[in-house]
Amino acid sequence: MREIRVIGDPVLRTPAEPVTVFDKELRRLIDEMFEAMYAADGVGLAGPQIGVSRRLFVYDCSGRKGHLINPELTIDDTDEVLDHEGCLSVPGRDTGKPLYASTPRAAGVRISGVDRLGKTVQLRARGLLARCFQHETDHLDGKLYIDHLPKDEARKIMLKA
């Protein structure tokens, strides 16, 4: 099973490269990402979180399950929503469980990309699924949810990680 990388690993702060080859290895990678996500009780997992600097993520959130390759995210509803958000790559030092913080995100998004066969996928999302898409897309850009927090709040999380 793929190991989930944690804060401090440079791959988490490096923008991921586009996926250009759609083959059996990519399909196997996506299956392994689902396996790692479920084993960690997550709702989403991006390539960099398992050390693969490629623009893809998997999700199983709000009754929707899938994957997106080379996603492009557009904010659909600029209303800001504060809700608890955590990350498998930002675990507590003592517990190994994700550390949560009230994190601002846009209320709604549109996202497009392709699936494992190269077929175009276009989705709209609100609520937790919109948060998930924003969170995973951030990973592909070398960002973490703590980057959306006030500096003092991010520092508190970092002291526990």
Image (tube, rainbow, N blue to C red):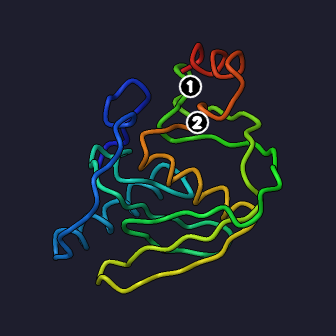
Task: Tell me the element at label 1.
Answer: loop
Residue 23 location, x and y as percent? Answer: 16, 76
Q: Disc 1 vs disc 2: Cβ atoms closer than 8 Å?
A: yes
> What amino acid is at disc 1?
Gly
Q: Is residue 159 above or below residue 86?
A: above
Task: Tell me the element at label 2.
Answer: loop
Task: Let me know if residue 1 appears in the view.
Answer: no
Task: Name the residue beneath numbered marker 2.
Answer: 98
Name the residue located 37 percent from the left edge and 42 percent from the top edge.
4
Compare residues 144 and 43 and report the one nearer the observer: 144
Name the residue located 61 percent from the left edge and 57 percent from the top edge.
132
CA distance for labels 1 and 2: 6 Å
Q: Is residue 36 above or below residue 155?
A: below
Residue 126 location, x and y as percent? Answer: 74, 67
Task: Name the residue beneath numbered marker 1.
Answer: 92
Compare residues 90 and 113 and report the one nearer the observer: 113
Task: Let me know if residue 65 appears in the view.
Answer: yes
Is 34 positioned to the left or the right of 124 in the image? left
Name the residue located 52 percent from the left edge and 32 percent from the top edge.
90
Name the residue located 51 percent from the left edge and 41 percent from the top edge.
88
Compare residues 13 and 158 and report the one nearer the observer: 13
